[in-house]
Amino acid sequence: MRRIVSVWLIDWPVTVRARSAGRTSPPDPALAPAVPLALIRRTARGAVIHALNPAARAAGLRRGQTQADALAMIPALACRPADPEADRHALEGLAVWAERWSPAVSLSASGDGLDGICFDMTGAAHLFGGEAALPHRIGTRLAEAGITARVAVAPTIGAAWALARHGDPERRTLSVDDDSLRDSLAGLPVEALRVGADIVAEARRFGLKRIGDLYPMPRAGLARRFRESDGIDLVRRLDQALGFAAEALVPVRAAPRYRVWEAHAEPLTDMDGIVARLPGLATDLAAALDRDGQGARALTLSGFRTDGTVSGLSVRMSRPDRDPGVWLRLFRERGLERIDPGFGIDALMLSADLTEPVTARQTEMTGQAVEDRAAALAPLIDRLSARLGEGRVLRPEPVDSWIPERAERLRPALGHVPSVTDPGDGRRRPILLLDPPEPIEALAELPDGAPARFTWRRVSRRVKRADGPERLSPEWWRPRPDGRQVRTRDYYCVEDDGGRRYWLFREGLYGREYAGHDDERAPSWWMHGMFA
């Protein structure tokens, strides 16, 4: 039996505003419980009420009413601008916090906007004291965070949504099973089927006020007459609520395939408690990965705080790994103190956000250790990236170009498996490459001789040995930044009388790209790098 939990966050926009205002000083007097408060949004009809606090609702105001009418009824009404974007952002944060109960949490909405969350608890209620205790536990946790909510558990998304918003107002938690689902929905109003106001008004014209009134009606006639512009009809919504039509949950973020967690009766208020429990979580997660032959490339440690927020820390690895010791070291390098316990963390979760198969590697052959320089380099990359940040630890990546300064680019080292193999094309490249190359004055035999002497940075050097040229043709499809023609390069490896080795090139060819005229396009010499 499928079990769906729907949580209706009563007066959610007002709650979000109160929670955000609690972090400012001085506090807004309009947020006092006894003061009638309305949040206003601008529409084509003008300023209308988007949300109300209990005091304003008790005074007879309603959502959708114009601000002018509301002020005529209650001159002392406090009006503040609504912020639907902030409400959505806060609701997404609450959905992440609700992952303590389910790995996939979805947002739910009513006709006035997003005002709840929904998640699947099938087969997992026993982890939280059983289904009878689960709705009460969820409601209690939300109340401790200052959030007023009503919780319903039902076999379908539509039924749970309907019971949470239109069920018995005296009860904060509701639960129905398959046997009582039809009878539980029969007494609810037609708007509990998540249909628009036009369909509700049309149904009332025909005397269809309750969901139970629809049961004996011909389905073909209902589907033909009561249909919204987006294609959703009354019959489909009814079938979804009763479980005759499938409906999928769309989570706020993809659920991790591997995760372990533990709840705490007494909230953790300091880092010592978090550090003490992390090894156990890491061991359990490593065991789950080992059973499936997987390794983690990215991990997230999430602390679910008692105030309805989540504080987390993520680490990434260049190679899949399932060694708890390596994970713990990376979390320490990253800085566990970044997890803010606030008023207390009552649940911890360690999840593997990205996994890859781990293939066995031979480490010895005939008694001799097989060198794997890439594998040896990976732990260093992981630790440096955790300590300094992923964007500050870079590695060169080959680019499809034979011009040396374009032949590679720097990318985050964690993005790819590090490679330390020799390209094997026989070309020598200096350990230090100047970008851009620096001009030099050279004395060389025409047309293709190596320089016998050159001056670089106002120091004259005599060439003792030279090798070359290595000719690199120009990439004519890439013009120079100054608009001049790109020309051929001849590279030379030279050594001066002091034993220092350089990488020089001549740009331009005598007789082909230069006809001997005295102009600025005469071949020129450049310093491009130094060898060790």
Image (cartoon, rainbow, N blue to C red):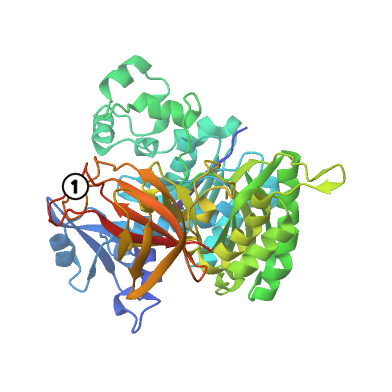
Q: Nearer the viewer, residue 431 or 13?
A: 431
User: Which residue lies at the image location 41% right of the left edge and 46% below the top edge?
Assistant: 470
Q: Nearer the viewer, residue 56 or 113?
A: 113
SS under mark 1: loop
Q: Position of residue 57 (x, y in %)?
A: 31, 61
Crowd around label 1: few <14 · some 14–19 · many ≥20 (10 Å):
some
Residue placed furthest toward the right: 367
Left or right: 165 as drawn, with respect to 478: right
Instruction: Quadrant for the C terminus, please.
Output: bottom right
User: Which residue lies at the image location 16% right of the left edge and 61% below the top edge?
Assistant: 67
Q: Position of residue 248 (x, y in %)?
A: 47, 33
Residue placed furthest toward the front: 445
Q: Is residue 370 above or below residue 34?
A: above
User: Which residue lies at the image location 18% right of the left edge and 63% below the top edge?
Assistant: 70
Q: Position of residue 64 (x, y in %)?
A: 22, 53
Q: Is residue 91 above or below residue 245?
A: below
Would residue 123 be seen by someone viewing this image from the given angle?
yes
Q: Nearer the viewer, residue 53 or 465?
A: 465
Left or right: 527 as drawn, with respect to 72: right
User: Which residue lies at the image location 48% right of the left edge and 47% below the top edge?
Assistant: 253
Would residue 172 be seen by someone viewing this image from the given angle?
no
Callout count: 1
Q: Position of residue 313 (x, y in %)?
A: 56, 63
Instruction: Quadrant for the N terminus, please.
Output: top right
Left or right: 249 as drawn, with respect to 527: right
Q: For residue 463, which quarter of the picture?
A: bottom left
Which amino acid is tagged 1? Tyr
- The residue carrying mark 1 is 514
